[in-house]
Amino acid sequence: MQILITHSSLSASRVLHFSRLQLALALAGLLVVLTLLSGTVYHVIFLKAAREGWPIVGSVVGMIGRDEGAARERYLRENLDAMARKVGEMQARLVQLEAQGDRISGMAGFKPQDLRPLQRAKDGGGSGGPFVPADVPGSVRTTEQLADLLGALEQRADQSADVFTLIESRLFEKRLAALMVPNSRPVEGPVGSGFGFRADPFSGRAALHTGLDFPADVGTPIHAAAGGVVQAVEFHPQYGHMLELDHGRGLVTRYAHASRVMVKVGDLVKRGQLVAQVGSTGRSTGPHLHFEVLVEGVQQDPAKFLSVPESPALASAAMGSTRP
């Protein structure tokens, strides 16, 4: 790019040569100068006019400031309302969870007074303050109110989490206790002699039969009626090859007349695990499992635990009977 300069005082015209790079730098410099100039004018003139209240410029600046403030306030108001509505939904959901927790706590065996210490601990011994419902957006007018409401919701959420943790623990205890109750049949098949007095198959005299008999072929699998620990594996003159499982809380199951025992003392067994095989060892008239349930060392009726109806015909049969 060339610029030709001529003047009457000059004996000859002057020619200035500019490259593209020089021209771009010149334009950039001009833009920077104009930006600085406009900023200076704004700060020196408009801000000063706004502060000192110049007649015309001050009113224009005031209108611009009011418009910007109104737009900012409207933006904050809209966002605050949206957040308040969201908090209202959270509050409604939390109320539903608390009601659900109350129902589940009753199912878990908790009484209302059991949870009151937890409520008092969370409340810190007292409460108060204005009520600000979260489901009405217009009631939340400041970010401070919204922050307070969120804090209260967080405290209630923590309390509900603690309640559900306590309920889960209680339900787990009940499930664990249920796993330790011998209510699974140790042998598939009908029940022979039941618990109670009967004619002894060897002497013919009335005698107490202390368990349930499950007639089955030799080698039929015998499964643990519940989870527990093997506390005894031995040969008994009357029970033959037998084992005992300790289920805790004074509850023991006994499996007698086995042909083979598959576990050893100290083993931890699960419900339904194979522990022995049916036989006819000891005082027995034929292959069967003699199954007993003992509470604190006293034989109980296993049918009450198994909830298995006995067959009257089989109950009177002498096959596979035993008398320990």
Image: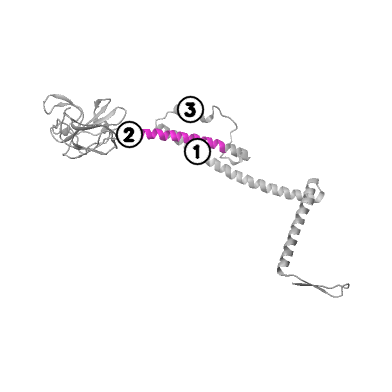
Q: Position of residue 314 (x, y in %)?
A: 16, 34
What x and y, as percent, mark residue 95? Answer: 50, 37
| Mark 3 residue type | Pro
Q: Earlier in the sequence, mark 2 or mark 1?
A: 1
Q: Is residue 193 above or below residue 81?
A: above
Q: Earlier in the sequence, mark 2 or mark 3?
A: 3
Which label belongs to residue 117?
3
Please name the residue that numbered disc 2 is placed on. Answer: 178
Judge whether residue 98 can be spotted in this image.
no
Quarter holding residue 2: bottom right
In this rendered view, identify the residue nearer to me: 43 or 129.
43
Q: Determine whether label 2 and label 3 are within 8 Å by CB.
A: no
Sort mark 1 into few (<14), some (14-19) or many (20+) by Cα contacts within 10 Å.
some
The magenta stretch is: 150-177
**Residue at (73%, 59%) from the top-left corner?**
32
Q: What's the amino acid at mark 1?
A: Leu
Classed neighbour count for the residue bearing mark 3: other residues with Cα under 10 Å, few (<14), some (14–19), many (≥20): few
Give yes or no for residue 164 being in the magenta stretch: yes
What kind of element bears circle 1?
A: helix
- In the rendered image, which residue does mark 1 sit on? 94
Question: In the rendered view, how is the structure colored?
Answer: one colour
Residue under the image location 75 percent in, 56 percent down: 36
Circle 2 or circle 1, nearest the eye: 2
Type of the residue with mark 2: Ala
Residue 143 magenta-highlighted:
no
Rendering quarter of residue 233: top left
The C terminus lies in which quarter of the figure? top left
Taking the image as drawn, is residue 206 in sight? yes
Q: Main secondary structure of the magenta part?
A: helix
Q: Position of residue 262 (x, y in %)?
A: 23, 38
Question: In the structure shown, which secondary structural element does the residue marked by tag 2 occupy?
Answer: helix
Left or right, 117 with respect to 140, comes to: left
